[in-house]
């Protein structure tokens, strides 16, 4: 079953965070071990990020998060660091799909992206479409994911989803 | 009920029911491809899905184009793995010297009114032929290769109306650079960019491909052009006869954003480092020396591009301190520029011709830049480090601007050279 409520501490980033900032191109070829590659996540803008981040933490960013290449290493390293969810004003399309496909929860919410600050404690409820800012005592709302994406997330990503449903043999 | 956009029309046709923007649908995929950078991971994901055969090997295309011929042992092994895998599973494989995946798909596979998926962000290119074509990550592509289907959200559409006569040598590349400069790198995120108007109608297929190719640089999911007599003639010339209906948006279709471009007033445009939406007119750039000029890629490596370049370079010489690299997008393009004498004109002017493929566009070989060097390229992306060196500067322009600049060794307005 999908975990639909996440509580964590926030790491804040700006807009247009491209896939090369998330993980530099040269790191992707060093090894196939994603945990190893994840050590270098965000290295260009936040030194030692991988050491500072804790299981369950949340990333909050501006518009166009994940723009650039179609490679899946970007959401994979974020998941490997233990990040529970990403909130952004908007996501680049391919990153958005890739995140869902690997079972990483993402939320689009402009208000949250603007008001939440680094270090805030937030609680996201995917089903209700709410983000509680426990530090500031505020609540923001977002449109819950379309059913199809929730189903993929529920299954733990596209691979288990397609194996369970023998491809796309599902009721629409 | 409102009329339909081109995206809604194609997806309604494929889904065999009436769909509109916002609907989530599961559709059949007609063509699915991956390249040497993305195919290995896609095959691995397929295995994890418990599937070891393609849904239909005839509809799967694997191309080694990103680093070809191989510059290293590691890449040679990847190429060998892909070649064997394709042989064993019976799918289409295009190897060394054949060309860029997108160009080969255009020449051999893509059909209008179908869904085309590629494990490459520039798959939007094929929308120029009226296919709903979009780039996806390896896991999605694995799903499509295994089951022949994918899920899509029918996108909202961005109307891009281009009218007025383009004044040669101003071309489609200048149009799309102008558009991205105005709407920004995320101006069309999640949306289908739909290009139409009299200028698009009068463009050949090569120019329409240039427009659609860069849709993703504005965040677009695909870039669509109408299907008309030219499209159908192009397909027939490339062994795809059949009944392909014309395609254009309905008069009363709903577009959530729109922009109009007056092509008659357009000047040659250029994108400055390090983002594609950092666009100016070439005439505004001022004196700037270039170390390398690169003409090729899925954006501008077709016969029509080299035809303009040859017109400008004929009887001229490339500047002493500038190197000119030329790379045909496919072996068919290469053959045609040889047959028509264009290759000879370019070589006489001082150009070096790379074998068909992506070449320096992706920064792994065949023209990597040095520290602090400036490159003017006809490709679609100028991100820092794109051409293999984070300390280099990439400018993007049309083939005409690139050719004129190769002669002077400086960023140059091609109108000075074109009569
Ligand atoms: S030519 Fe450049 S942009 Fe086109 S597919 Fe190759 S690497 Fe990508």
Image: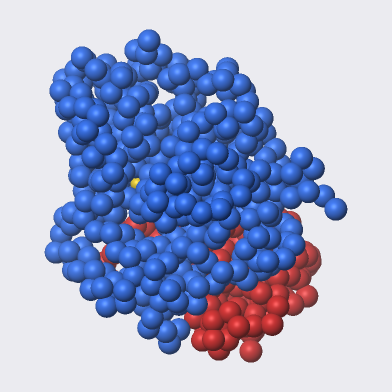
Residue found at the far front of this picture: B242
Quarter of the rendering occupied by the C terminus of chain B: top left
Figure disc tally:
0
Residue A103 percent across, percent down from the top left: 55, 77
Q: Nearer the viewer, residue B178 or B5?
A: B5
Residue B362 percent across, percent down from the top left: 31, 49
* Residue B418 shown left or right of residue B279 in the figure: left
Residue B24 percent across, percent down from the top left: 68, 67
**Chain A palette colour:** red
Residue B27 percent across, percent down from the top left: 60, 69
Residue B417 position (above or below residue B186): above
Instruction: Identify the residue at horizontal 43%, vertical 74% (top origin).
Output: B56
Q: Is residue B88 visible in this depiction of the protein? A: yes
Instruction: Identify the residue at horizontal 62%, vertical 36% (top origin).
Output: B196
Chain rendered blue: B
Instruction: Identify the residue at horizontal 85%, vertical 53% (top origin).
Output: B1
The picture quadrant where one finds residue B63 is bottom left
Residue A54 position (above or below residue B94): below
Q: Nearer the viewer, residue B416 or B105?
A: B105
Q: Nearer the viewer, residue A102 or B296?
A: B296
Q: Nearer the viewer, residue B294 or B207?
A: B207
Colour scheme of the picture: by chain
Q: Is residue A135 visible in this depiction of the protein? A: no
The picture quadrant where one finds residue B291 is top left
* Residue A124 shown left or right of residue A97 in the figure: right
Residue A45 position (above or below residue B409): below
The picture quadrant where one finds residue A3 is bottom right
Residue found at the far right of this picture: B1
Instruction: Identify the residue at horizontal 52%, vertical 66% (top origin).
Output: B29
């Amino acid at each position: 079953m999908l975990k639909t409520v996440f509580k964590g501490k926030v790491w804040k980033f700006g807009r247009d965070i491209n896939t090369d900032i998330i993980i530099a191109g040269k790191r992707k070829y060093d090894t196939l071990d994603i945990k190893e590659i994840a050590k270098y996540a965000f290295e260009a803008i936040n030194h030692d990020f991988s050491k500072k981040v804790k299981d369950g933490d949340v990333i909050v960013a501006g518009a166009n998060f994940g723009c650039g290449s179609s490679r899946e290493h970007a959401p994979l390293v974020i998941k490997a660091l233990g990040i529970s969810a990403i909130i952004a004003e908007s996501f680049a399309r391919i990153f958005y799909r890739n995140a869902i496909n690997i079972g990483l929860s993402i939320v689009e919410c402009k208000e949250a992206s603007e008001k939440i600050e680094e270090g805030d404690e937030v609680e996201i409820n995917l089903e209700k479409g709410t983000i509680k800012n426990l530090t500031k005592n505020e609540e923001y709302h977002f449109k819950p994911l379309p059913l199809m994406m929730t189903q993929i997330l529920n299954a733990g990503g596209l691979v288990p989803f397609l194996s369970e449903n023998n491809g796309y043999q599902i009721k629409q | 009920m409102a009329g339909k956009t081109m995206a809604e029309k194609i997806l309604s046709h494929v889904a065999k029911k009436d769909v509109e923007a916002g609907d989530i649908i599961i559709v059949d995929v007609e063509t699915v491809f991956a390249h040497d950078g993305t195919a290995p991971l896609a095959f691995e994901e397929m295995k994890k899905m418990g599937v070891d055969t393609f849904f239909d090997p005839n509809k799967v295309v694997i191309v080694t184009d990103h680093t070809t011929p191989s510059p290293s042992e590691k890449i040679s092994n990847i190429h060998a793995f892909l070649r064997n895998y394709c042989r064993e599973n019976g799918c289409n494989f295009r190897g060394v010297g054949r060309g860029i995946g997108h160009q080969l798909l255009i020449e051999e596979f893509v059909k209008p009114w179908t869904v085309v998926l590629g494990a490459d962000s520039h798959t939007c290119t094929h929308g120029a032929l009226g296919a709903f074509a979009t780039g996806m990550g390896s896991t999605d592509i694995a799903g499509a290769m295994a089951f022949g289907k994918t899920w899509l959200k029918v996108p909202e559409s961005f109307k891009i109306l281009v009218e007025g006569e383009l004044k040669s040598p101003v071309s489609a590349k200048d149009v799309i650079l102008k558009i991205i400069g105005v709407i920004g790198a995320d101006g069309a995120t999640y949306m289908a960019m739909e290009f139409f108007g009299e200028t698009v109608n009068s463009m050949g297929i090569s120019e329409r491909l240039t427009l659609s190719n860069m849709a993703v640089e504005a965040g677009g999911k695909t870039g669509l052009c109408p299907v008309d007599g030219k499209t159908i003639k192009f397909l027939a010339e490339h062994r795809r006869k059949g009944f392909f209906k014309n395609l254009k948006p309905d008069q009363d279709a709903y577009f959530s954003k729109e922009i109009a471009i007056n092509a008659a007033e357009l000047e040659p445009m250029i994108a400055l480092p390090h983002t594609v939406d950092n666009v100016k007119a070439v005439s505004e750039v001022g004196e700037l020396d270039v170390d390398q000029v690169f003409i090729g890629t899925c954006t501008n490596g077709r016969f029509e591009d080299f035809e303009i370049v040859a017109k400008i370079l004929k009887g001229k010489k490339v500047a002493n301190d500038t190197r000119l690299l030329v790379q045909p997008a496919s072996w068919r393009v290469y053959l045609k520029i040889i047959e028509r004498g264009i290759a000879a004109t370019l070589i006489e002017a001082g150009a070096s011709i790379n074998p068909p493929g992506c070449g320096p566009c992706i920064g792994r070989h065949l023209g990597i830049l040095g520290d602090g060097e400036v490159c003017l390229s006809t490709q679609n992306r100028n991100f820092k480090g794109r051409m293999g060196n984070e300390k280099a500067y990439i400018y993007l322009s049309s083939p005409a601007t690139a050719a004129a600049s190769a002669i002077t060794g400086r960023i140059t307005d091609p109108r000075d050279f074109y009569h």
